[in-house]
Amino acid sequence: MRDRHEIFVLPTETSIWQRPIPVAAIILLALAIHGPLLAMQLPATTSYDANLHIFFASHYAHHWFNPWNEKWFGGFSQTTYPPLTHQWIALLSYIVGLTEAFMLVQLAAVVLLAVGTYRFAQLWVDDRAASYAGVLAVFAGSIAFLVYSAGQLPTTLSAPLYFLALPYFYWWCRSASWRALLKGVALTLAAASAHHVTLIFGSVLFAVPVLWLAWYDGREQEQPAAPIIGRGFVFAAIAAVGVGVILLPYWIAIIRHPIEQMPIPHASRSNLLMNWIYGMNYFIVPYGALLLALPFIVIKGASNPRLRMLLLAFWVTFLIALGGTTPVPRWIFGRAFEILTYERFTLWATVLALPIVGLLVAQVIDRFPRWGAISVSTAAVASLALALGWLSWSPFRTFSSLNVDSVVAFLNRDGHDQYRYLTLGFGNALSKVSTFTTANSVDGEYNSARLLPEMTRYGAAQLTSAKYFGTAGMDSLRVMLQHADHYGLKFTFVHDPFYEPLLVFGGWRHVESYDSGAITVWSKDDAPPARTIPSDAVPAPWEGWMWGILPIGSSFLAILFVWLLAEPRRVQGTVTLSREMPEGVYADRVRS
Amino acid sequence: MKWGLVAFLTVATVVLVAIAWLQSGGLKQHAMFAAVTPEEAVQALMSQIQAHNYQRAYASLDRSSDTDLASFTRDMAGSDGSLRTYSSLQTAEVSPLHADRDQALVRVRMNWSSALGSLDDVRDLHVRRDGSVWRVVWPKPAFSAVPPQVVSVNYLRWDVIGRNTSQNWGAQEVDSPKVRITSMNAISRPGRVVILGEVENEDTVPAYLNVNATLLKADGSPIDEEGSFDLISHVLLPKQVSPYRIDFPGVRMDAVKSVRMDARALLVSASADPVIAVSDQALSKDGLDRNVLKGELVNQSGRPVNIAQVLAAYYDDSGKVIWVSDGYVDQALMPQVPVPFAVDIPNDIAGRLKNYRVIVNHYTQASN
Amino acid sequence: MMRTSRGDFTLCKRLTGLALLCVLPSWARAAELQVPASVEAGQAFSIPLEGSGQATFYLLGPDHVVKRSVSLGSELPIQSGDVRTAGRYQVIVCGSSCTSAGFEVKAAQPAHLSFFLHPSRVPVSTPGSIDATAFVFDRYFNLVLTPAAVDFQITPASGAGFSRQVSTRHGAAWMRMDSTPHEGRVQVTAVLGNVEEARVIQQVAAEACALRMKAVTSGDMVTLETEPVRDCSGNALPDGTVVSFTKIDKAGKSTVDTPIKKGIARVQFSVRGPAQISVACGVVLGNEVALGGKL
């Protein structure tokens, strides 16, 4: 971030408590807090999706230009998920290995998230409050939750890219700076290449308030509204075309095979009041101490006209993040309500709230410099600690740390990889098995790409976790086992004796045990070798080339533009801060 | 404006949460736990069972219930590695049968999601008024027990030794068991074609068996291939006969020209234990007025059988197999203790059947 | 399987040989090489080479190629290891010009038998149920195509043994025979000269024959016990064979599938009122017992 739009000259007598925290310090803080946690590879052992993303990345590492992955569901197209994070992991994996590459990209995402929050907050509040927002982002429970519990790397990378793009969007609307346009569009394209859902919702929840802000600030400075709004639409049009082109294989895949499978239950869609564990998981833990600031957010947001749109955006996002606790998401998304998961909305709500929370922190510190700082720090650390502690205290357990070496070794020897396999009771360790084995499975962890009727008709997710989906899950598993011959499904690895009766009565034989019987291997001896399953979802070769070049290219372009196209240093107005200055009278920011 | 917006956001949030709470059945749940009607009392009890909260469920029972917590928990949660221990209550439909001022009879149809599919359990429960609330009178579970004794077990077992797939060409080998499909019948059922019949192990060693069928069109091309999956006894001892049934959902009989059968047998280690007697079999009607074949299973061996599957073949007056049905027993078969079972029979089959034969498959946990 | 044990074959050498075969036929006519029409596998021999000077010698066999520098005007020794595999060989000698000749390597004396006896279990007294097939190989595992007499010696567990001699055709000798009336182990040995290979077949009891049970009542219990279950040749069915008992009385129908133990199957039923009890083993029905009059 070499460009600076404004410079505030601080009076020499300003206390250290009243100075903005430098961006470098925020970055160092993010590295200091999350660096060790990621160096310990925590997401790989505690999160739900980290291994899934490593699996996707491993495919790109081996087949960069062929997004058709036969390791899951008898074959599925990775063009159904934007590839940026996976491709970056794949690139880095050649240097440091897959898991380590994931951690590096995740660390970059966390750092960018802190910086993105800071830059986004700068649009709404003064530098000091914005810097507090950046610092609080490092400790935010929702970020820790998404990184260490959910393992949603694409969401946590896409969001900061988008938040970093928004200030350029703002300046393009205000000043018609072509540099801002190029950087903003490039960052937006990179954000879309990382996670499409973030872009779709971000356009409404983040970009619209920023466009409104540009109009509002323009009006304050007697700038005509039409050019501002027009430029906003130009930006949107360019970004839309860019996203349309860069993610063209994704659109083709989604149009050809829209998600029509039976809805799969997800706890984030439930009414959090009806189940306190879910409430804890999706509300208390992600928001943490931020919940204490809710009254201030509402009152402060409502009292300052410039913050009202931000408040409304936060409120809508907050309501959506509550899942089934309010009818709002169901009203907004209709049938798509049953497809989306809502934990990522807590992250967005957090970032939308942090500018106002930054104001609160500044006020607290102004009033109680030492104890205010201590209490805010304590609350921030407690939020992070709660999210990390919840990894142990939560009744939800992942299987990421399951040792699957014996399973991988079995599949990779004696031609066992000529057949397909299934895991039962492996949870998200399935991705780990799939990453390192050469054999293919009929199961998989990425629900949106499933096309096999045995899976799409029953309203259950992974077969490996079938029992958690009740009758739907077990029926789906039963049908898949019935069709074992058709899919060349010969081996089933069981890490939960719950599934053994079905295998026994279904004609499977126990052939081996590993880890003192913790993992058993079952075989269907008469299953024929697996055949390629014909599919109309296989991307064309040109799609593979597009997919391998454009999304990662957009990220290189964004880095290049941000690095090379520095905004001319300019001073909009030199403002001397004074403790006696009345509220909201300087620059175009809101101060505490 | 400021306070107006604050008030709007606050009120709107509260209203929205309240709407969702009502939509999620919060009010209903509240009323249910208040148990001011017999149905609500049963629903509240089922809700506790669904949440595996047996202590609270037991505490909500009427004091006249002739059971203790351990028996109640065993009745609902299962024991001895039975199928019920692999199950969780999915839904409970409650319907009143009779009610007066202080007493009521309520039918509850519990649907359990189990490791082997969905299981139904229908019970008629007495409910009594206790002040302002109603409480379920839980009947005493009928757990039979046999006196302590020593059962001598000298069961037979077959082991396969000395097999080596890497041996030279022409080396001594043992053949797979010889099995024979003794009968096959293709019938049309609503929405599917069903292939059923019987298969016999003609050999003198146990066979591990799968029966597959391929439906063929007039031009010989396949329509669909399916296997018998759990509608067969996969382990057949010498001279043992098992019924099988293979379903082809979505296939119409008029599209089928012929059927290719494939019985694949493997030589495996096996045991002749346990022997399970099927006693007192009789055609009957269940509480929902469905045709069922009822009876009792008696494990004549010394070790518990955790899960038993009843497989019944029905014959018409010419001796042809006209239907095969199965059912899993959700209680463990403890040695010498009779356990009741019932398997469904379609109405049209019940009218035509002249004879039937029952065999029992079993699953025993490795640790037993 | 036998041929792949020779490790010196490479695709490269074979291609070289084939190329030479294509390119050199005109030179091959230039001069004749004196080679034997046929040799026995693994037998060394020599080829006289006319002329003087150095030349290159190629030997193209079915599974390998040999290339060597030789001196013309001397005897060219062919090592026994170069002609182990039976088949057609081509010799090419290239000096100033090339000459070639072909010869046949035939299998040596029989040294191995691959013997298939099928099935491994067979019911007694079943006509044409046992197949014995022997393939004759020399010590280099070349199939010996010269007719040879294989002696199949059959040794039942009880009774006198017998043998049958069969001449090989195209390297294989086979016979089919009936299983004997007595159960037990039957050893079949294929013998060719000093070479013999033994296999064992298990003759097992056939279907049950004249299955009978008797009932002993004690109060409301009835104990049913079969007579020793035998096939029509009098062989006892092996323990573990399942016998099905079916009882029909007022309580309904009861069935028990019980395995034979020590030759008999036994089961106990409780009986309410008149009862009819039947027994079966596989598809064979036994006698019926009626207790307490007709149902």
Image: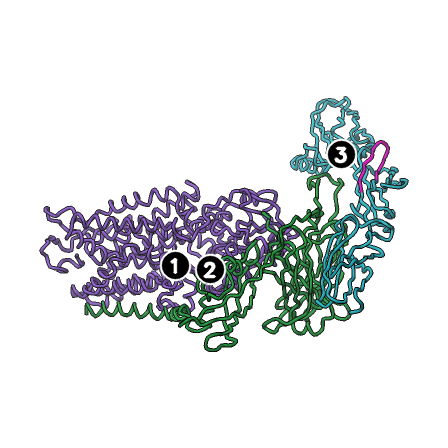
Chain colours: A purple, B green, C cyan
Is A589 left or right of B306, judged from the image as shown? left
Q: Which mark is residue B54?
A: 2
Q: Looking at the picture, which amino acid does disc 1 mark?
A: Tyr
Q: Nearer the viewer, mark 2 or mark 3?
A: 2
| A486 or B157, nearer to the observer | B157
**Marks 2 and 1 on same chain:** no
Residue B203 spot, x, y in % from top left: 77, 51
Kindly state the secondary structure of the residue where label 1 is placed. helix
Kindly state the secondary structure of the residue where label 2 is placed. helix
Q: Looking at the picture, which amino acid does disc 2 mark?
A: Tyr
Kindly state the secondary structure of the residue where label 3 is placed. loop
How far apart, in angstroms, are the residues tagged by discs 2 and 1? Answer: 21 Å
Q: Looking at the picture, which amino acid does disc 3 mark?
A: Thr
Which residue was labeled with disc 3?
A: C85
In this rendering, does residue B147 appear at all? yes
Disc 1 packing (10 Å; few <14; some 14–19; many ≥20) = some
Q: Chain of mark 3?
A: C
Q: Which mark is residue A278?
A: 1
State the extent of the magenta-drawn residues as a range.
C188-200
Q: Going 34% across and 61% down the picture, which residue do you hit? A: A321
Residue C127 spot, x, y in % from top left: 87, 51
Q: Is residue A255 above or below residue B236?
A: below
Please tell me whether residue A312 belongs to the stretch shown in magenta. Answer: no
How far apart, in angstroms, are the residues tagged by discs 1 and 3? Answer: 76 Å
How far apart, in angstroms, are the residues tagged by discs 2 and 3? Answer: 79 Å
Q: Chain of mark 2?
A: B
| A161 or A443, nearer to the observer | A443
